[in-house]
Every structure is written in C-alpha cells, then in structure tokens.
Image: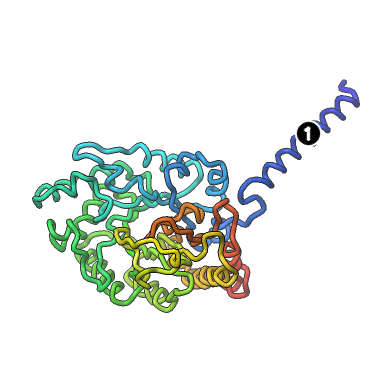
Amino acid sequence: MLNKNFYSLFAGTLGLLLSACTGAQQNSPGAGTPSLRETFRNDFLIGTALNVPQIEERDPKAAALIPLQFNAVTPENIMKAEVIHPQWDKYNFEMGDKLVAYAQKNNMKVNAHTLIWHSQLPAFVRNIKDADSIKQFFTNHINTVAAHYDGKVFSWDVVNEALEEDGSLRKSIFLQKLGEDYIVEAFRLAQKASPHSELYYNDYNIEQPRKRAGAIALIKKIQAAGVRIDGVGIQGHWRAYNISLKDIEESIREFSALGIKVMFTELDLGVLPNPWDSDAADVNKKAEYNAKMNPYPTGLPDSIQSKLNKGYKDLFTLFLKYKGKIGRVTFWGVNDGQSWLNNWPIQGRTNYPLLFDREFKPKQAFYSVIETKTTKAGKKDN
C-alpha cells in the first residue's frame, strides 16, 4: 500500500507539470486568442499563403499559430512553374508534397497555385520561340503537375491573371503563341488531369467593372465550351483607406450568378502610398525608393491603424452577408513581416497589411474581424 508521502510527492510533481504546461501555453503565439478558423467555421474557409520555412515548420511561433488560425493554405511560390517545372523534362514535387503532408497533418485544405501564369515561368520557356513547343510545354505541364496532385489538393488556380485592366486578354506568351482559346484548353486539360479538385480562375482587380466584365465573359466562354470551372478568385490586394465595397459586393453577386463559388484569395490591405495611385498588383511593376513612400518605418500612427481596422471590419461584414456564396477568404501571408508588400512596388519599405504583426501577435485589426461575428448583425447572420 502506498503511503501518504508518496501521494504528496506525486501531487506536487503533477502540479509542477501542469503549471509548466499552462505557462508554455500562455507564452505560445495565439494562446488565449480567438481562432479565425473556428470563428468562421460555419461561414467560409480561412486561408493563408505559406512560404518554405513555414511549411517546414522552422519558426516555432509560426508553427504554433498557423494551425490554430487557418484551415486552408495556398503555396506562396513553390507550385509556380519556375519552381515545380524547372527544366523541360524535370519536375520538382518535393516542397509541394511537403505542403500536402503539412495540410493533412493539420486538417487544412490546399489551394494549389498556379498552373498557368505568364509570370515566374522557368527560363527555358522564356527562350522558346515556336508555338508548337509552347503548346507542348503547356500541355505537359498541366497534365503532369495537376495529375500528380489529383485527390491531394482541394482546388487549383488553373489560370492566373490573364486579363488586362480593360478586361481584354493580357498579351502574354500563351495568348501570342496559342491564341484566345488557351484558357478554355487549360481548364479542359486540368479537368481531365485532376478530376477530384475544384478549378478556379484567379485575378486582381476583377471586382472593378471593366475587368469584371472581361472575367465574366471569360467564365461564360469556358462554360459554353462544356468545360468545368468551379470558382473565381478575387485577389483583394487593396489599400485600407480606399476599398470599393460597392464594386466588391456587385462582383460577388455577378460571379455567383454564374453558378460558381467566389473566393477572396490573396487578401491584404496596404497602408502605404502607391506611386501610381492604383490598386494594380502586377508583380513586374517596380518603382524607385523614396523616403516619402515609406512613412511608417517604426510603427503605424493611430489614425492609420484605425483605417486598417475599419477596412477589415467592413470587408468581413460584407463577406458574412454573402457567406453562402463565398467559399474561402485567404490572406496573402501570415504576418506583416512576410508580406510581399514590404518590397512591392518599392523595395525596402515597412508595410502593415495583415492581421498579425511581425512577432505573430494579433493586431487590433484581428479583433475587428472577430467582432464582425459578435455584433448584432453578425448574430442575426448565424
């Protein structure tokens, strides 16, 4: 029979262990913080873009926070053609496979990004001159990559950014070499190679009327050809102080009227001035550094923080209004330090476009998003 001293020792040791565990939880990122994925679990998926260190869980703070907050992931770069298909007859699935394993482990859905895009092409494609070789690359790339991930990824951004601002087709290498039907053919090939994945068209500024009209015409053309398209991704690279909620609402209505899902796929709200005073997100556009274009190198003033808070709150209030039509909202990055907007369109700036700061701590904008579910309107919407 065990004596009283043993029980005292056991209880003391157990208390220390519980205390240590509690302390570790309190010091971990997101401890005691609401969860985006849980808050909106009955509304739409909440996603984020992941880079290689995050997929490999090298950063303990990111590794702790991401599975708590997100239930969908998009690869930032590793599934783009220059990475996954670096040579004519060579494919590199290593990191993409790691992403799939990471998502499975954390009960997340993968939106694979992207099969056909005019940017970030492998060097050998940029050097091809004849149409037949471009067509062969185009066909082999979709067949091989999409088939490899069939049943492993929830969805594909089949074609990315194929439209100009006026709604016409972008003068890309694919349009020039393959003609206007290349987008329909991309979806046809993807449908055959990856029958168990949803297929999306993804672009920026397609909430704006002229470009939206071009996207609608494109989607109707795919549908008229008898080819499957399941959704459209509106990227959402907007400025916090200049969000056209009216255009966004109209785009949700008009795209969903086509019988497809609407996604917001690369959401971030920049707070820095844009040298062209526009919401364009062409990665190839650059501008020179100017101190006036980097006004908040050490932190946001309250007046700008308030605009960021309001921007996110207004957006998520709108998203909840149309939750039956929206399949996913994905942030383009986990925290401010990761955001591409620190270096686009001007290198070396300090931007604050996301919900978590550079230490992975939730910002007030995070709580503004959460509050959209706890307001009177949010409760009515449940």
Name the amino acid, label 1.
Answer: Leu
* Residue 105 in sight from this viewpoint: yes
What percent of the width, then of the height, locates residue 116? Answer: 25, 53
**Which element carries disc 1, helix, strand or loop?**
helix
Q: Quadrant of residue 140?
A: top left
Q: Is residue 7 above or below residue 296?
A: above
What percent of the width, then of the height, locates residue 236? Answer: 41, 65
Q: Is residue 29 left or right of residue 228?
A: right
Which sits in the foreground, 159 or 268?
Answer: 268
* Residue 202 in sight from this viewpoint: no
Residue extending furthest toward the right: 4
What percent of the width, then of the height, locates residue 231? Answer: 34, 62
Q: Quadrant of residue 207?
A: bottom left
Q: How many marks?
A: 1
Q: Residue placed at 46% from the left, 44% from the top?
A: 103
Q: Quadrant of the C terminus?
A: bottom right
The residue labelled by disc 1 is 14
Q: Is residue 297 left or right of residue 192?
A: right
Q: Quadrant of the N terminus?
A: top right
Q: Residue placed at 59% from the left, 56% from the top?
A: 35
Q: Residue placed at 44% from the left, 74% from the top?
A: 243
Residue extending furthest toward the front: 291
What percent of the width, then of the height, locates residue 63? Answer: 54, 43
Which sits in the foreground, 29 or 339?
Answer: 339
